[in-house]
Every structure is written in C-alpha cells, then in structure tokens.
Amino acid sequence: MQAISFKSRTTWRQRFLGGDQREVSSAWKKAEAAFQQYERGEAGWKLAHGALSVFRREGHLNDRAWAEQQIALALPLLSGRRWSKVRGFLQARETLTFLDRLHRQLREAVPGDRLRAELVHLWWLRRQRLRANTSGAVGGAAHVAPLVQQVVCQKVDANWRESYAAVSRVLRRTVRASSAVECMNGVLRMHQSRHKTVTQGLLDLKRLYWNCRGFREGRRRGRCPYEHLGLKLTSYRFWDVLWMPIPAAGAV
C-alpha cells in the first residue's frame, strides 16, 4: 500500500476544510438573512399592533391619521408571502373604522373638546395603576396621577362625573379591529378544520349568525353583538333576520 506524503495530506485537508468552510459560510449567510428578516417583521408588527390600539403608548387617544402613518411605516418591514394577508388587512380602510366610530361616539357623549380630552386621559390613567397584589415596589406616581387628573377635570366642569360615566361607557365598548379578527378567526378555525375552503357567502352567513347570537355569560350576557353596537332591528333572531321560518327540529 502506497503511503500518502505529508504534502498530499496537507493539500487534501485544505481542500476538505475549504469545502466545509464554503458550505458553513453559505449556511451562515442564509441564517443571518433569515434572522434579519425576522427582526424586520417583528419591528413592523409592533408598529402595526400599536396602530390598532385604542391608546398610544404615551396615553394619547389613537386616531385614523396617526394609525395610517404607523401602518405606512410598518408595511415595508412586513415583506414576504407570510405577511401578505396581514398587509392586505392593514391596507383595508375598514380596519380603522373602529377609531372613526370611537371618536364619533365620544363627541356625542361629551361635546366639549377640552372636557372630553381630560376625561379620556383620566380613564387611561386609572387603568395604569398597579394592582394591590402586585409584587415589588409600588410607584407613587401611578396612584397620584389619576387623583391629580381628577382635580383637573373638576376645574373644567364641576359636574364632570356624569360626563365621565358616558366616556367610560364608550371606551369600554370599543372593540379593536385586531380583537374582532382574532375572535372571528377562532370561530372559523373550527369550520376550516372540516372544510378546505370557506366561500364569501358562507362567511357572510356565519357572521350574521354570530352577531345575532346572544352572549350567555360575562358582562354582555343576554344581548347579541348587534344590540351592543346599537344596531336597531325589528328582531335579532337569526331566522327572523333571514326572513325564514324556524325549522321544526333544532330551532335556534
């Protein structure tokens, strides 16, 4: 058997390791690109999620103009096929309808701009207070700020409590677009597990059914989503809305 010289072994080892290094370098570049794309997507989703919130991070009430600006910044970061449905959802005008409805209802509840703004800020501050069972040091500012804001509201209007109750009702009933989509997706997943496709007609029918279905528990029990939204109908029963007789068996 012919022995392999040191020079030959060195050349073979360099070629072998060189090939390995090229593969490792190529794989590392792919991993870096994938990680950078993930970071861009995460940053974009944080911007989009903030645009779909009722309040901004600093406590100001969200509005369509600011939300559209945040979405415009987020869209370039949400690239790729995996984000295609999210981009379509964010670009739909109906996505921010909840903000238009929120501002309209607040104006109807409290016509005065100054008082309305102070009451909304008070509502937000009261929800930033730490709970009594929170572990660790409790900051005093979180408890003092709502009290100070309450004094501000009283100086603007001595009878501020009644207006605050109206503002509170509007804000409690506001449903974010993202929450509505998550709720709808939870209902549709059960159907999608049994069927490959969901047609638009079937989607409309299921939407009507769940919006006419009364809540069985919780703070909203006894009324359906259409009633909570203030939609006036002669009847909220699913079959009555369809103008169809109730089936004899399995009546809803």
Image: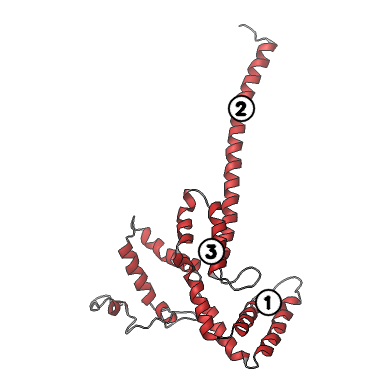
Residue at 68% of width from left, 76% of height from top?
Answer: 129
Secondary structure under tag 1 reads loop
Secondary structure under tag 3 reads helix
Type of the residue with mark 1: Arg
Q: Which mark is residue 68?
A: 3
Q: Are marks 1 and 2 in contact (CB under 8 Å)?
A: no
Quick check: 149 left or right of 77?
right
Q: Which mark is residue 209?
A: none
Q: Earlier in the sequence, mark 1 or mark 2?
A: 2
Q: Residue 155 or 165: which is nearer the viewer?
A: 155
Q: Which mark is residue 129?
A: 1
Quick check: 87 left or right of 197?
right
Q: Residue 171 or 158: which is nearer the viewer?
A: 158
Type of the residue with mark 2: Asp
Type of the residue with mark 3: Glu
Q: In 3D space, how far apart are the residues under numbered discs 2 and 3 (Cα atoms)?
A: 49 Å
Q: Position of residue 25 (x, y in %)?
A: 62, 32
Q: Residues within 10 Å of mark 3 (few under 14, many from 20)?
A: some
- Reply above or below: 89 against 236: above
- Reply above or below: 189 against 226: above
Q: In 3D space, how far apart are the residues under numbered discs 1 and 2 (Cα atoms)?
A: 57 Å
Which mark is nearer the camera, 2 or 3? 3
Residue to which mark 2 is pinned: 20
Furthest-bottom residue in this view: 159
Q: Are marks 2 and 3 in contact (CB under 8 Å)?
A: no
